[in-house]
């Protein structure tokens, strides 16, 4: 936890979401400190992905507020949040499958002045320069993600783990300062998993990007996250460092019945 | 052999070029906005008639009047979008399709009002065909094929090399993901209409040059345009262009006298070729010839 004067990067207070009679989130409150990698754990069906969807503006909450750096962004549209520097990845990666990996990244860059109408014909020189700069930046991000050799491959040809990296790359291209990662480790082989973890840690360290990570791989969470929140049946049942959360009897009970060895 | 080239291959390519121009726009519109634009044929006729008015009124050549045709179809498409389609953007594709049918009827009524129902032709000087080794080429046919090629090239550059084109492809790939990735969807939709309307204006002038102008000229080739777009995989502009060329060739070649003098298919049944292609594509390869490719 870095103690900084300003407001937390992200704060969720009293968020409730019901689907019919089912209470998916029951007055959830948690904070993500600026510049931290924060974990969000909990058994299946705890409401983690629902919370992500609400934070990123995909679902309106039935109550409560979301603040991004102190500003109320509750129920703001996903693209506005995206423009404000909040990006997310999906549990099942979602890419533009008929475009190349490089193009997937280039589309995510903000301020696309070239999308305006007369642009391709007017001010061609400037647009060409911008286009080259954008391409160079996308290639740089791909290098950072160890994907440069796949730049020209169609996105649909990548493995599941590589697709997750491309999603992360898109978040980086959008110049997001807060990134929500939904299960970056699920279905990824051990080698690539190490790589993904190192990339996340390096981005946090070197560029000060704040991460909120949903993850079932508790060893990865222990390695990566400075603070962890545990959600069960729509409620926050524990928050603290990984060892504190592991020691919490409620957490052990929530995971009971799953074959997890918490210690 | 020469007979095949002169009377079947070249006319087939000319017709194919016209279908390609029209189908590419349909495919772009479908990709970005997810609906079948039934007013496309009448937009084409509008372009042709405005070109005729410009070329006779100003005394310029038909080729030079193409910008005037586009200057009519582009605002028409943008106005139809702002007045009708934009309000229905969130409704079912069938609702949008029906509203575009309404726009088609309005455009056609406008053409009847302004230009009358009688078929007319562009005032073209009679020029002798160029002859190479027995291959006879009408200069206007050469220009039509070249013009369509230039349009295809420009579209390719826009789609693959510019941000705007990339944004259009992103929207046709996954509209929701494009929106949340910060793509300016309203601007992309406007750009799509501009491109599709320019292409269809060119197609209208070419069709008028190849045959004659009548208010239903565009509606008559609408089915073939849809068949081309579906053959190439709807939402894939390059596929639609290929589909158009293939369909144009298929229609013209269907009457080739393969069996001692008797045509393969009676010329009256020529327009059934588009139906057959459409049905076979939907049965055998509903995602089009180029599925699985970028």
Image (spheres, coloured by chain):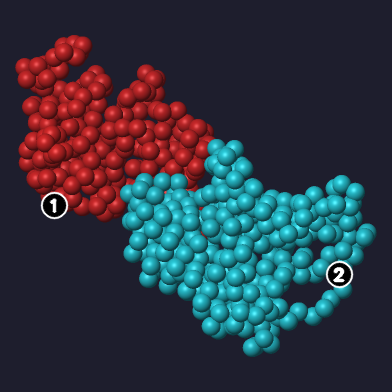
Chain colours: A red, B cyan
Chain at tag 2: B
Furthest-right residue in this view: B133
Q: Residue A72's mark?
A: 1
Residue B206 in sight: yes
Out of B180 and B89, give the one closest to the viewer.
Answer: B89
Query: Is label 1 in contact with label 2 (beta carbons under 8 Å)?
Result: no
B290 relative position to B208: left or right: left
Out of A50 and A35, give the one closest to the viewer.
Answer: A50
Residue B12 in sight: no
Q: For residue A261, what is the image quadrant?
A: top left
Which dot, 1 or 2, sits closer to the camera?
2
Q: Residue B129's mark?
A: 2
For the point 59% across and 45% down, which residue is it? B279
Q: Is residue A255 above or below residue A93?
A: above
Label 2: element kind: loop
Q: Residue A182's mark?
A: none
* Number of other residues with Cα within 10 Å of mark 2, as a class: few under 14, some 14 to 19, many 20 or more: few
A79 relative position to B93: left or right: left
Quarter of the rendering occupied by the N terminus of chain A:
top left
A153 relative position to A255: left or right: right
Quarter of the rendering occupied by the C terminus of chain A:
top left
Label 1: element kind: strand
* Number of other residues with Cα within 10 Å of mark 1, as a class: few under 14, some 14 to 19, many 20 or more: few
Where residue A144 sits in the image (x, y, percent)? 41, 35
Out of A126 and B12, give the one closest to the viewer.
Answer: B12
For the point 37% across and 71% down, which residue is it? B83
Where residue B28 sits in the image (x, y, percent)? 51, 56
Q: Is residue A219 above or below residue A105?
A: above
Q: Is residue A50 above or below residue A217?
A: below
Are callouts 1 and 2 both on one chain?
Answer: no
Where residue B107 sits in the image (x, y, percent)? 50, 74
Chain at tag 1: A
């Amino acid at each position: 936890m870095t103690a900084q004067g300003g407001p937390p990067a992200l704060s969720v207070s009293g968020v409730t979401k019901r689907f019919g009679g089912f209470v998916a989130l029951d007055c959830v409150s948690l904070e993500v400190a600026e510049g931290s990698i924060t974990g969000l754990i909990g058994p299946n069906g705890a409401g983690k992905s629902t919370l992500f969807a609400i934070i990123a503006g995909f679902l309106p909450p039935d109550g409560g507020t979301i603040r991004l750096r102190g500003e109320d962004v509750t129920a703001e549209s996903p693209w506005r949040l995206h423009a404000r520097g909040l990006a997310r990845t999906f549990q099942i990666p979602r890419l533009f499958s008929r475009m190349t990996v490089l193009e997937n990244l280039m589309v995510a860059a903000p301020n696309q002045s070239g999308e305006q109408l007369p642009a391709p014909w007017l001010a061609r020189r400037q647009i060409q320069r911008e286009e080259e700069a954008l391409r160079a930046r996308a290639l740089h991000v791909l290098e950072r993600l160890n994907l440069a050799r796949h730049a020209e491959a169609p996105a649909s040809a990548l493995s599941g783990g590589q697709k997750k990296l491309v999603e992360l790359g898109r978040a980086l291209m959008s110049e997001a300062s807060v990134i929500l990662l939904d299960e970056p480790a699920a279905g990824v082989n051990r080698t690539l998993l190490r790589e993904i973890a190192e990339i996340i840690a390096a981005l946090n360290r070197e560029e000060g990007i704040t991460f909120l990570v949903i993850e079932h791989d508790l060893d990865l969470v222990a390695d990566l996250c400075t603070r962890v929140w545990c959600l069960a049946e729509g409620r926050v049942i524990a928050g603290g460092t990984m060892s504190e959360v592991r020691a919490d009897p409620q957490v052990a009970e929530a995971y009971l019945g799953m074959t997890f060895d918490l210690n | 052999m020469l007979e095949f080239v002169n009377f079947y291959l070249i006319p087939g390519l000319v017709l194919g070029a016209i279908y390609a121009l029209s189908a590419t726009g349909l495919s772009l519109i479908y990709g970005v906005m997810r609906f079948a634009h039934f007013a496309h044929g009448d937009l084409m006729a509008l372009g042709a008639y405005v070109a005729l008015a410009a070329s006779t009124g100003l005394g310029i050549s038909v080729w030079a009047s193409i910008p005037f045709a586009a200057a009519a179809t582009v605002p028409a498409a943008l106005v139809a979008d702002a007045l009708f389609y934009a309000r229905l953007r969130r409704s079912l594709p069938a609702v949008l399709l029906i509203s575009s049918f309404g726009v088609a009827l309005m455009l056609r009524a406008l053409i009847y009002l302004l230009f009358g129902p009688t078929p007319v032709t562009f005032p073209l000087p009679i020029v002798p065909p160029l002859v190479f080794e027995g291959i006879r080429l009408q200069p206007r046919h050469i220009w039509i094929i070249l013009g369509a090629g230039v349009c295809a090239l420009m579209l390719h550059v826009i789609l693959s090399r510019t941000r705007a084109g990339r944004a259009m492809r992103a929207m046709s790939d996954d509209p929701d993901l494009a929106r949340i990735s910060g793509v300016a969807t309203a601007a992309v939709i406007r750009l799509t209409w501009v491109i599709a309307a320019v292409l269809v204006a060119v197609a209208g002038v070419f069709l008028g040059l190849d045959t004659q102008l009548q208010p239903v000229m565009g509606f008559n080739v609408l089915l073939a345009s849809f068949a081309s777009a579906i053959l190439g995989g709807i939402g894939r502009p390059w596929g639609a262009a290929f589909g158009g060329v293939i369909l144009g060739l298929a229609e013209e070649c269907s009457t080739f006298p393969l069996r001692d003098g008797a045509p393969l298919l009676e010329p009256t049944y020529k327009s059934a070729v588009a139906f057959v292609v459409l049905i076979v594509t939907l049965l055998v390869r509903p995602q089009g010839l180029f599925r699985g490719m970028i």
